[in-house]
Image (spheres, helix red, strand yellow):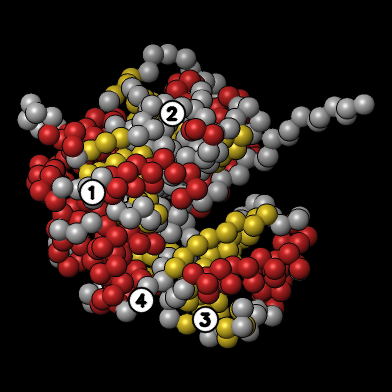
Amino acid sequence: MMKAQLPLSAAPIHFGTDGWRGILGVDITVERLLRVATAAAQELAFRAPAGLNSRTVVIGYDRRFLAPELATAIAAAVRGCELEPLLTETPVPTPACSWAVVQRAALGALVITASHNPPEWLGLKIKGPFGGSVEGDFTAAVEQRLAAGGITVPIDAGTERFDGRREHLDGLRSKLDLGALRDGLQTMGLKVIVDPMHGSAAGCISELLGEGSDDSGEHAKVIEEIRSQRDPLFGGHPPEPLAPYLQELIAAVGACSDAGQAAVGLVFDGDGDRIAAVDENGCFCSTQLLMPLLIDHLARARQLPGKVVKTVSGSDLMRLVAEDLGREVLELPVGFKYIAAEMLSDEVLVGGEESGGVGFGMHLPERDALFAALLVLEALVESGQPLGERIKQLQQRCGTSSHYDRVDLHLADMDSRHRLEALLRETPPSTVANQPVQEVIRTDGVKLRLGPSHWLMLRFSGTEPLLRIYCEAPSTAEMKAALEWAEQLAEST
């Protein structure tokens, strides 16, 4: 006899590194979302900087199931706080909302999105008046408001809408010479294949680099997009720019190579704030490789000012390229909010994390994958080299050729996690896969330095028995050995 399955129970409302997310219909319901949107809007108004008299809160949404409807619903919650909601006409990349906040001097933005999470998830991101994600003290205050309760009645009424997508793209056009970039790609004969993973960045690169072409449709030979139609199931995979989910893009780039044409693949996550790439050889390139390229291009070719900010999980190649160009490097905990805070307080050339988020001092204190993609293409045109060749040149210049991977390991339970945390805190390993540990770094989790461009990092999820294991090593064999050693350590503790 089959046992009846107990219904899933909602997790407590708790903000992660960038927003509140959960399973739609379980964690994310209209009732809960209205409460969170109300508390967030109230906190935005309470913390408005001196002299900012706006009552506007920008509201955006991605292409997920029910995202447009829930965005309309939270507009009523914002009105109930005696504030003025401004809603995007269409799904937009999350950075478009940050752009709108800055351009309109708004209080901030609320974005209905679950970013790169699986299709059944949804969530809410909060952007501050500076055009980036709010910090932990802000979301803690939102959680305190939720715990305190209180009554605020949503007000249904017509909501003013605006073309956030167009405004964002116009902003990118104002910062870059896209005509010269398009001409340079044509001269190189480099085809650009874009994979927005069915997300809200679909069509943006084609529009930016296709505009102004002649009647022959010359730009069609340069830009091609795949998986650009809306699919709330995202093809059955999380819309996260990782190699296992990019087989169609890798195949498309490989087909160009087989036909004798160099190509580069660009991929964005579900809400367009993370980027990765595929080089002309069909090799996946995360921001571990794209960041060094961007550092070199902006510091050497463009000669822009500022230091480089990376997370502790970022490749050593970022540091090597930056220091070779005389730039200061600051290493911070994982999470773009730490990078954004530094961008607000000091001059930053570029800041990025290994998971795909890159921000630029010349733009916003925010991840913007479209802007990053255009700068990657600009760097390739400037050098006249395709992506794989350009990265290889950087590695040779810095005397390194490292290999990187990350494994997310689900532990048996929270007790297992606590035992492993205690072990790493009290008696960190002195060797890893027969390699002596030279330094223990505790910026975020535990990072075990084994040598130049050789390290292993163990970092726990904030809310669940999940261990993230990162490794960079001089060879694939050494990388795999270290990751296997870490998995065995976790499973035996």
Q: Is residue 323 above or below residue 436?
A: above
Residue wearing tag 4: 400
Residue 444 position in % (x across, y down):
54, 67
Q: Nearer the viewer, mark 2 or mark 1?
A: 1
Q: Which mark is residue 450?
A: 3
Question: For the residue marked with disc 1, what is the amino acid?
Answer: Gly
Q: CA distance from mark 1 to mark 4?
A: 29 Å
Nearest to the observer: residue 78 or residue 174: 174
Q: Residue furthest right?
A: 1
Query: In this image, 455 relative to 87: left or right?
Result: right
Q: CA distance from mark 2 to mark 1?
A: 36 Å
Q: CA distance from mark 2 to mark 4?
A: 40 Å
Residue 357 showing in the rendered view: no
Q: Is residue 125 above or below residue 462?
A: above
Q: Nearer the viewer, mark 3 or mark 2?
A: 3
Residue 433 showing in the rendered view: yes
Q: CA distance from mark 1 to mark 3?
A: 41 Å
Residue 45 position in % (x across, y down):
42, 37
- The image quadrant that residue 399 belongs to is bottom left
Question: For the residue marked with disc 4, what is the amino acid?
Answer: Thr
Tell me, yes or no, whether the two marked residues, 2 and 4, touch with CB atoms within 8 Å. Answer: no
Question: For the residue marked with disc 3, what is the amino acid?
Answer: Leu
Residue wearing tag 2: 63
Residue wearing tag 1: 260
Q: Nearer the viewer, mark 3 or mark 4?
A: 4
Q: Residue furthest left?
A: 214
Query: In this image, 175 relative to 195: left or right?
Result: left
